């Protein structure tokens, strides 16, 4: 089966995860694709295929060459809930430039001026939706590429390789994909998540990340008699936010620049709450950002009274670069594979997180590779067929002994 055919089959499954559900997996619909993949892995001849109680799917191809490392390939099965995840109506078009009309009836158009990545796709085949749902290339393109690689290896016994470990995870889109991953049982010396964008990109630098909750405890009293008595929690919350650097927000940063991002606010005069995510590639600056929030809370508590502001900080994940640097051969292998497939590798920083970051700090060094998917998490998501095919070739070069 071609990578295109696999991909079109996999995106027919609605696998939207649900952040509001504390269970793993967070949605029962992820089981349906997991069981389909489990059957396919067994039919192809992978060994040790197991689908655990939390919807993590594992399997491996034994080595047929000596002294080769055991290499892991990982992708996630869930899709984001930012836009509808079904019913997906994909179609393949040969792109000849200009705007792409996704839905004639609804007037939904992917405009070339809004999506510069289209300029590099002229003459290629793109898989798009009808503009009413996401496509699911994030990360079913990665799943399809790994499975197609497995089929190639198992049907070409002359192809020499070390042990190939395969893992498909649930709930990556809600930040839990690595929570219950069985690193020891997976059996890889190192791994790659196949969950990026352009086929020529490799990512091994990501944000250090933390969350912050600011609880503001005010004092409510009738406005008519409030002088020198009321402490309006809403106004105090605004004051807290105003003390953060106004230009260090997502709207004003790029590349390696970090930020504070206010993503939730609610309350009334008596109680208010602010929620932030804190991000920075540099570990020292990351720690300084958390310290700055602590100083602001302490200053305002001195101004308005002890315990008026309650700051709760929680680290989420760290920059995998510090772990990847301990095993440079992992990046060297990926760079070799990309060049061998005629690509010009680009090492780009991730302005976000990845399961690979979590796994790297769990003992499995795990940078991220591209898939040929673009515009993820929205209705204008598309996948380039030729880039998906190239990524299968890249994976062959990576696992080749």
Image (cartoon, rainbow, N blue to C red):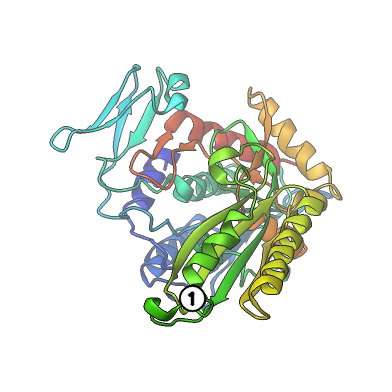
- Residue 193, image x and y in percent? 62, 50
Give the side of residue 129 with respect to residue 295, left or right: left
* Vertical placement of residue 286 versus 122, above or below: below
Q: Pick the quarter of the image with the N terminus.
A: top left
- Residue 168, image x and y in percent? 54, 60
The residue at 37%/30% (across/down) is 126
* Vertical placement of residue 379 versus 72, above or below: above
Q: Residue furthest left?
A: 105
The residue at 29%/48% (across/down) is 133
Tally the marks.
Answer: 1
Q: Secondary structure at mark 1?
A: loop
Residue 313 sits in which quadrant?
bottom right
Q: Is residue 318 visible?
A: yes
Mark 1 lies on residue: 227
Please name whichever residue, 278 or 230, is drawn nearer the observer in this view of the structure. 230
Q: Is residue 23 visible?
A: no
Please name whichever residue, 47 or 87, is drawn nearer the observer in this view of the structure. 87
- Residue 177, image x and y in percent? 56, 64
| Dot 1 crowding, Cα within 10 Å, few <14, some 14–19, many 20+ | few
Please name whichever residue, 387 or 309, is drawn nearer the observer in this view of the structure. 309
Give the side of residue 24 with respect to residue 189, left or right: left
- Residue 328, image x and y in percent? 84, 43
Give the side of residue 282 with respect to residue 20, left or right: right
The residue at 40%/46% (across/down) is 6
Residue 46 sits in which quadrant?
bottom right
Please name whichever residue, 173 or 245, is drawn nearer the observer in this view of the structure. 245
């Amino acid at each position: 089966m071609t990578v295109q055919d696999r991909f079109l089959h996999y995106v027919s499954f609605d696998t939207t995860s649900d952040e509001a559900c504390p269970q793993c997996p967070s949605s029962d619909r992820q089981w349906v694709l997991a069981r389909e993949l489990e059957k396919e892995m067994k039919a192809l001849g992978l060994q040790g295929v197991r689908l655990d109680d939390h919807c993590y799917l594992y399997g491996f191809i034994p080595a047929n060459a000596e002294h080769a490392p055991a290499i892991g390939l990982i992708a996630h099965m869930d899709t984001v809930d930012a836009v509808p995840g079904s019913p997906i109506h994909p179609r393949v078009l040969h792109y000849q430039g200009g705007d792409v009309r996704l839905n004639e009836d609804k007037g939904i158009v992917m405009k070339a001026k809004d999506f510069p990545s289209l300029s590099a796709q002229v003459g290629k085949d793109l898989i798009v939706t009808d503009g009413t749902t996401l496509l699911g290339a994030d990360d079913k393109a990665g799943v399809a590429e790994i499975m197609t690689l497995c089929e190639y290896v198992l049907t070409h016994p002359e192809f020499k390789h070390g042990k190939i470990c395969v893992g498909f995870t649930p709930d990556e889109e809600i930040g839990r994909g690595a929570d219950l991953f069985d690193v020891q049982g997976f059996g890889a010396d190192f791994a790659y998540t196949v969950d990026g964008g352009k086929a020529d990109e490799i990512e091994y630098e990501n944000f250090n990340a933390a969350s912050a909750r600011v609880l503001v405890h005010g004092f409510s009293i009738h406005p008519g008699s409030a002088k020198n008595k009321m402490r309006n929690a809403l106004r105090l919350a605004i004051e807290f936010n105003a003390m953060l650097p106004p230009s260090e927000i997502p709207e004003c940063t790029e590349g390696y620049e970090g930020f504070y991002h206010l993503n939730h606010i609610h309350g009334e005069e008596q109680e208010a709450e602010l929620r932030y995510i804190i991000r920075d590639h540099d570990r020292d600056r990351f720690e300084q950002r958390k310290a700055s929030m602590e100083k602001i809370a302490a200053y305002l508590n001195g101004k308005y009274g002890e315990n008026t502001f309650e700051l709760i900080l929680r680290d989420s994940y760290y920059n995998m670069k510090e772990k990847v640097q301990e095993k440079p051969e992992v990046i060297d292998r990926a760079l070799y594979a990309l060049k061998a497939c005629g690509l010009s590798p680009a090492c780009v920083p991730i302005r976000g997180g990845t399961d690979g970051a979590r796994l790297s700090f769990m003992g499995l060094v795990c940078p991220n590779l591209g898939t040929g998917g673009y515009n993820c998490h929205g209705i204008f998501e598309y996948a380039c067929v030729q880039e998906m095919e190239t990524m299968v070739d890249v994976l062959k070069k990576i696992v080749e002994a």
